[in-house]
Image (tube, grey):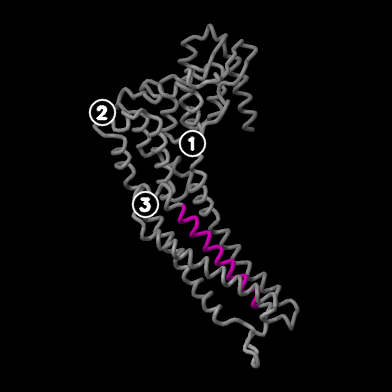
Amino acid sequence: MKTLAHQLVDKLWKRVGIPYQQFSSNLVKNSMDLIFEAAKVGNVEFLIILARSYPELILRQDEDKRSIFHIAILYRQESVFNLIFEIGADKDTLASYVTSKTKENMLHLAGKLPDLDPLNIVSGAALQMQRELLWFKEIEKIVPQSYVNRRNSEGLTPKEIFIKTHAHLEKDGEKWMKDTTNYCLIVATLVATVIFAAVLTVPGGNNQETGTRIDFRNNWFIIYFISDAISLCSCSTSIIIFLSILTSRYIEEDFLKSLPLKLVFGLATLFISMVGMMVAFIATSFLVFSSAGGWVPFVVITLASIPIALFVWLHLTRWVDTFLSAYKSRFLFRPYKHRLFLVQDADWGIDMKYKSNKKQGKLLEVKG
């Protein structure tokens, strides 16, 4: 359905289109509302279809002198904003735009807290704070250096706006991270206690003559010992990680990379320790019932798999969100190649292509 919708937009746009040489200002004026609305909701495919026909549309401004990239920043639409990496030297021109009413540049807009919908892309206030910091850091690289500390009509710099509007989110992020860590720390402590006690009470008993384990050469005994060791080591690691989260400074830089990474590793090691504990329990059941045989060990395996499956089902979403925020966020802003202006339209006689050397100026040549 999405592909068909894009094809429909392409056909309709060609219907209302006119030769590039006769491109009228009226058509530009009537199309701008659609373009800014598409940037607001993140409909990047719609923008690409229009920009391929009339590339100058992507440089247009609204009544407040904001481009579609300013709108994308304000509403946190990274798919639309990533188009800025494809327009060459025009990127510097767009980055210098300042709104007419509030005298704000792109970095001022990145410092503002968006509506709830863009924030709800990720779960948890700490991960939302991380995404906001990623936006601010990325825009900081694009705007001219003189704009970083430039003040708006209210006398505020972009950094001051960010601190002011994100103060509540930062506190919520700290609370969310501490609550999550405390719950996981309790579970990790209980698992460590159980595993440590299991190591001291190895099943099978000792040989009265030699003093060695009766089941020392049994494969299930080896599995039991290895799984116990893995579980105890990973559980101890998760406790150390969770303690480091609790003692963190909770400054902005911690939310950007350190805290999400620690939470990912903490949850992963906790899961490994629980799996190791269940495997040790299964191995013990086979050691105890190996002589009797029958269906008892298989019932134990089934029962032991229930808490593991339940843990994965209940915590998988949070772990995946945290993992994506910690690792995939580095690819949130990336330039795409040849999405916008690599097209040749025989109907309108427009030939658009990239220049080989980006330093020579604009990436776009239009010949009609």
Classify mark 2: helix, strand or loop: loop
Q: Quadrant of residue 306?
A: bottom right
Residue wearing tag 1: 333
Callout 3–callout 1 Cβ contact below 8 Å: no
Determine the residue positioned at 49% across, 39% down.
332
Q: Crowding at label 2, few (<14), some or many (≥20) Cα neighbours within 10 Å?
A: few
Taking depth in this image into account, of 4 and 98 the one nearest to the observer is 98
* In the image, residue 190 above or below residue 22: below
Report the side of 76 relative to 342 (left or right).
left
Q: Label 3 is placed on what type of residue?
A: Asp
Q: Is residue 34 visible?
A: no
Report the side of 160 relative to 269 (left or right).
left
Between the residue at mark 3 and the residue at mark 2, the CA separation in whole angstroms equals: 29 Å
Q: Is label 3 or label 1 in front?
A: 1
User: Looking at the picture, how far across and down is residue 349, in whole percent?
Assistant: 61, 10
User: Looking at the picture, how far across and down is residue 265, in whole percent?
Assistant: 50, 57
Q: Label 2 is placed on what type of residue?
A: Ser
Bounds of the magenta segment: 261-284
| Residue 172, disc | 3
Determine the residue positioned at 39% across, 38% down.
137
User: Looking at the picture, how far across and down is residue 100, in whole percent?
Assistant: 32, 22
Q: Label 1 is placed on what type of residue?
A: Phe
Q: Crowding at label 1, few (<14), some or many (≥20) Cα neighbours within 10 Å?
A: some
User: Looking at the picture, how far across and down is residue 37, in whole percent?
Assistant: 47, 27
Q: Is residue 331 visible?
A: yes
Residue wearing tag 2: 153
User: Which circle's residue, 3 or 2, is located before the other in the chain?
Assistant: 2
